[in-house]
Every structure is written in structure tokens, then in C-alpha cells.
Image (cartoon, rainbow, N blue to C red):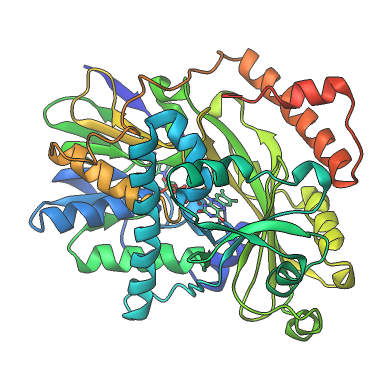
Amino acid sequence: MTRFTFRPVVIAGGRDRSFWLQDAGARAASLPLSGSADCDVAIIGGGYCGLWTALRLKEHAPDLRVMVLEADICGGGASGRNGGQVHSWFAEIDQLTRLVGETEALRLCRATADAIEELASLQASGTIDMDLRLDGWLWTASSRAQEGAWDPAVAANTRLGQAPLRPLDPETIRRRGGTDTSYTGVQEARAGSLHPAKLALGLRSLALARGVVLHEGTPVTTIEAGRPCRLETPAGAVSARKVVIATNAWATAIPELRRYIYVVDSQIIATAPVPDRLAALGWSGGASVCDAQAHVLYWQRRPDGRVILGRGSGNVAFAGAFGAAFNRRPGATADNVRELHRLFPSLGDVAITHDWTGPIDCVAEHLPVFGRLSGQPDIHFGVGFNGTGIAQAPVAGRILASLVLGHDDEWSRSGLVGLGRRTTLPPEPIRYLGARLVRHAIRQRNDAEIQNRQPNALVRWLSAQTPGG
Ligand SMILES: Cc1cc2nc3c(=O)[nH]c(=O)nc-3n(C[C@H](O)[C@H](O)[C@H](O)COP(=O)(O)OP(=O)(O)OC[C@H]3O[C@@H](n4cnc5c(N)ncnc54)[C@H](O)[C@@H]3O)c2cc1C
């Protein structure tokens, strides 16, 4: 009998929770599983991916018995900790085209644009209040080395007759992004920002209203493959015809998936609300902004006048295993604070009230992968969002629902399905040591490039050795 064993989820408590989860007063809405239960589909993980999959399954088959098992509370993972930047896959169309070809790339990009409209209508109808502001997503540069980072995406879009990314002038960046340190870029207009935890908790409510059975505080410890599969939890067991692994970076516990996923983190800070100071900068609106550094830097202005600013920190998890340091590392906020002050010199005295970290499930192609575990027709997975999931998880839900239901359609046939065309990573400890070296070089390159200095040749070479090129 084949068994898959998960690693424990180290749950963030109190101040180690993200600003978003604290702000939303997030707490469990369901009881841990106790005793035995059965269902048609058991989804492991109550983040955007798991919840959207549950919702899509219910759209197709309202009577299907769908259960979500979440170790923490829904949104306790990346879905309640992220930067809240909402943008489609048009910015990644060049990478998508390389992986799945032009036609499928365009279809997937349009699907994420449709997902943004779906979020907008969930908010407009009062179904989910997620503070969605479609005031644009700005992809900008603040140093010479970053200029034109968007050119491959713009060129790939142009080849396909699309123009979703429009040039930005410095004045628009200053007004909508609050800074004149960034001075060039492009923007996606039907994109913007939201409150990630409100979205996660809203999806949870919607799933409950649609009849999804939810157990929070319920880590799945093992999956025993079989017909049905048996999932063990600390105080119970679930028998399920189909299983979906939607555990983001925690999926590295599964040896087959670990060969493709490396786990890094991104760290975010929130300032105290300073609406008057932001008004003095002429900064209003809910655009989300990203600076094209290799360790991507991103920020948004909250309606209450806080600045939320995050950045890839370069931290790598050995063998994909991680603990409390991927929840919060208060001692490591200096980089983010430095960047805050570089972008907004006049905010040098503003207090940082929150800082947190979250794990990111990276794959070499920077695009998620879906499928079934080898030899396991009933155990599905969806991983590898690479730090871009808000408008992508609704599409992931469609793909996973079609796979689970055995549909033969454009979703189950998507080029994102199957590990066959994906890049395996080197084994440990080579992977970890290599990743540390490369990440350190990226950091040095960033630091030099931000100041318009040229990094040395070794740093340039090492920093280009990321998986997938
Ligand atoms: C700091 C940060 C910033 C980001 N910024 C953005 C952004 O601005 N825009 C954007 O689009 N995307 C962003 N992302 C990416 C986005 O948040 C993710 O792609 C998305 O949330 C992934 O959803 P998920 O459901 O796959 O993962 P998660 O939300 O992490 O959900 C996985 C869940 O599985 C649970 N789990 C794990 N193991 C088990 C187990 N054994 N049993 C039961 N439950 C288990 C975890 O507790 C977790 O809740 C960011 C991510 C991070 C970390």
C-alpha cells in the first residue's frame, strides 16, 4: 500500500500572523475533524487553490460531497499573507508561450483576465468584500538594469495581436505609485490590488454556503493510496474517492513533487496609516506596483493610508522543508525598510507596524503544474504558482475540477497539466547549496543595480543560473 506522509505545518500565532489576517480578525469558521468521515473529493489545503477547486467542483456537480481539510485556518498560508497584487498572466505570456505554445498561452491569459472580472463581480454583488480596486497594475523600473524587463512580454503580446501592457510615463507612476524613484514601465489597466485575507475568508464563506464541508485545524498527516484513498488526521480519518493536494510549498513533502519544486520566501512590511503623508505625495488610488528587481519588489497603498511593501528575501528551504522562519523574521526587515525609504524618502520616520513572511512554491518554468501523482489515478495536485496566484487560482480550480471529474475538455487538456515537460531540479544538498549561492549573487546584483552600478562578472554569471534560465 503506497503512503504519502506530510510534514507538520508550523502555524503562525498572534503578531506573527500577516497584517491582513490580523486586520480581518481571521479565526476558524469550522471545527477540526474528529472521528471518521467520507466524501467524494477531499481537498488538502484551504488556500485560494483548494477553495477555488472546491467551488468549481460544486459548480459542475452541486451534489458532489467535497471536503476541504486545512491544517491552520483558511488563508493561513500564502493566500492570507500575499502582496494583494492582482494581475493577469499577460505579463508572463512569453514564458507561457515557451511552455504551452501560443494558442494555449493566449487562452490561459484570457482566463486570468476573466478571473479578475469574476473577482470584480463577486465584490460588486456583495458576495465577497475583498477591497478590490481595479486601478491598474504598474510594472516599473527604478534603475537602468531594470528598464525594459517587460519587453519580452510586450513583444509576445504584440505577436499575438494583444496590447494589455501599455507604456507608463513618470508622472503617472508618481501619481499612481507614489514614487518618482521608479520612472518608466508599463501598466495593465484591468488589474489592481485587494485585501488577500478578506478574499480567502470570503471564498471560505462561499464554499461553506455552497455545501462544501470544511475542517480547519486539521492537518492531513498521511494519504494512503487506494480505492478509496484514506487520509489520516490527528483525531480522525477520511475516506475519499478522489484527493487534491493544494498545499502550496508544503507539497514538497511528496517526493515526486519535490523533484520539481524549490521553496523560497517573500517578506512584507506594513507601515502605520499615514493618509495625509501619502496625500502630500499626491498618491491616491489602489494601483498595485512592482519594481522589476530580480527579487521582485511590490507595494500598494491601502485605503487607510498604510503602505504595504514586500520583496523576495532570498531565503531558500533545504529539501523544501520550512518552519517558523517562513512565518516571520522580524530581524530581517532591514532590506524592505531600506527599499521603502529609497522609494519614499519622505516616509523615513513612519513606523513599521507589521512584518511577516510567506512560502512560495517555485518551479523552473515559473508557472504552475497540475496532474496526478504517478501510478495514482485518484490523487491530483496543483502547485508551482511562483508568487502569482490571485487571478491564477480561479483558473487552477477549473483545471483541477476537470481532472478530478474526468472531463475531457480544454482545462483537462491544458498545457499546464503534466510533469512531463517540466524541469527536474538537482538533488539535495546540491540544490540547496546552489540555490544559496545563486540567491546571494542575485542579492548582490540587485544591490549594485539599484544604484546603477555594474555587478562584477562572477556575480552576473552566478545570478543568471536560476532554474529554467
Ligand atoms: C509573501 C507572498 C506574497 C505574494 N504576493 C502575491 C501577489 O501580490 N499577487 C499574487 O497574485 N500572488 C502573490 N503571492 C502568491 C499567492 O499568494 C499564492 O500563489 C496563492 O496564495 C497560492 O494559493 P495556495 O492555495 O496554493 O496556497 P496556500 O494559500 O499557501 O494554501 C495552502 C494551504 O495548505 C495548508 N496545508 C499545508 N499542508 C497541509 C496538510 N498536511 N494538511 C492540511 N492543510 C495543509 C496550509 O496551511 C495552507 O493554508 C504571494 C505569496 C507570498 C507568500
Image coords of residue 351 (percent x, y): 81, 71
> Is residue 330 left or right of 399 when viewed as pictured?
right
Q: Quadrant of residue 401?
A: top left
**Residue in the image at 56% along x and 47% along y:** 154
Q: Is residue 97 above or below residue 35?
A: above
Between 347 and 118, which is closer to the camera in this rendering?
Answer: 118
Image coords of residue 162 (percent x, y): 45, 52
Image coords of residue 265 (percent x, y): 62, 42
> Is residue 183 left or right of 328 when viewed as pictured?
right
**Residue in the image at 90% along x and 46% along y:** 451
Give the position of the N terminus as an image quadrant: top left
Between 107 and 344, which is closer to the camera in this rendering?
Answer: 107
Q: In this figure, what is the number of numbered marks? A: 0
**Residue in the image at 80% along x and 61% along y:** 340
Image coords of residue 358 (percent x, y): 59, 48
Give the position of the C terminus as an image quadrant: top right
In the displayed image of the protein, which residue is found farthest to the left? 63
Q: Is residue 18 above or below residue 23?
A: above
Between 9 and 211, which is closer to the camera in this rendering?
Answer: 211
Q: Is residue 61 above or below residue 224?
A: below
Residue 126 visible from this viewpoint: yes
Residue 236 visible from this viewpoint: no
Q: Is residue 441 above or below residue 203?
A: above
Between 187 and 383, which is closer to the camera in this rendering?
Answer: 187
Q: Quadrant of residue 219?
A: top left
> Is residue 343 left or right of 85 when viewed as pictured?
right
